[in-house]
Image (tube, helix red, strand yellow):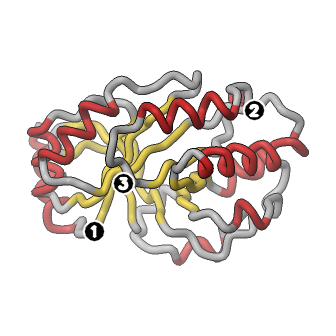
Amino acid sequence: MLKICLTALFLTFALAESGINTVDYLIKKSKAECFAKSQIRRVIMEALGEDGVINLNFFPSYLNLRNGGIHDIEAIVRTNDSIPIERTCWTLAHYLPVGFNGTVWFSVESNPGLWSLDIEDRIPFLENLTQTCTQHGLRVGIYSDAFSWVNVMGNQLAGSNKLRALPLWYFNDNDARNFDDFSYATFGGWNKPVQKEYKRGYYLCEFYCEGLEFY
């Protein structure tokens, strides 16, 4: 408990304009208020899991975050190419709360169970997914890292102009709150990311967070 409290105290002074990735856990109003006091400005929550099922904690957590003083709220989807694209986009468009205007991030992670298409079909699938969801009125982006991108897409340079036009959120667990590492860890043809997950697995306000974000 002492370690958690000291960590929270340190983060209170050190994390201005930072965000957290809370996965699919329920966030109570008291936790949201604590996040806000700790200078957390953005919270990213899982909207759809690997099986394409909605996270029932998203809606109540969204309301609690807003009532607790955090209004920059985004969503992440664990992309699974076996889930029909129209189903994914329809579910997001009808499930996300009224007034939600944050980015919906589609993850490209090296989990073999999520990618059943042939490698050459995966870029077109991701293009179609993001374009279809955009047509449903969603703001979309890509979440990945160089290692995962190579494993899923076949090589570091695989990509397309359509995907490169989308914002990129990338992961590198190096405790560095900057984008300096991206020049030698680039992938997919992106030149500039908009967000970085630079630390994974820690407690803030006695609440487990999957990642700490810099943007």
List x then y, in percent, for residue 183: 64, 76
Q: Image quarter for residue 120? A: top right
* Occupied quadrant, residue 182: bottom right
| Crowd class of label 3 (few under 14; some 14 to 19; many from 20; radius 10 Å) | many
Q: Quadrant of residue 175?
A: bottom left
Q: Which amino acid does the dot numbered 2 rest on?
A: Trp
Residue on which disc 2 sits: 115
Image side of residue 69 versus residue 19, left or right: left
Q: Toward the viewer: 97 or 206?
A: 97
109 lies above or below 24: below
Q: Residue at x 79, y 60 (%)?
A: 159
Tag 1 secondary structure: loop
In the image, 29 versus 6, the foreground residue is 29
Residue 23: give x, y in percent of width and height. Answer: 39, 36
Left or right of 105, for residue 213:
left
Measured as percent of width and height from the top left, residue 129 is found at 69, 43
**Which residue is tagged 3?**
212
Residue occupying image coordinates x 57% and y 64%: 167
Q: Is residue 8 left or right of residue 199?
A: left
Q: Answer with left or right where residue 28 lies relative to residue 196.
A: left
Q: If you read the primary sequence from the N terminus, does the residue marked by circle 2 or circle 1 appear first?
A: 1
Which quadrant would the N terminus be assigned to in this image?
top left
Q: Amino acid at mark 3?
A: Leu
Using a 10 Å C-alpha cutoff, classify the residue at mark 2 as few (fewer than 14 neighbours), some (14 to 19) or many (20 or more). Answer: some
Q: Nearer the viewer, mark 1 or mark 3?
A: 1
**Looking at the image, is 112 positioned above or below residue 17?**
above
User: Badge 1, how many Cα within 10 Å: few under 14, some, many 20+?
Assistant: few
Mark 1 residue type: Glu
Residue 71: x %, y % from top left: 24, 55
Q: Secondary structure at mark 3?
A: strand
- Give the distance between the C-alpha atoms of the residues marked 2 and 1, in whole angstroms: 34 Å
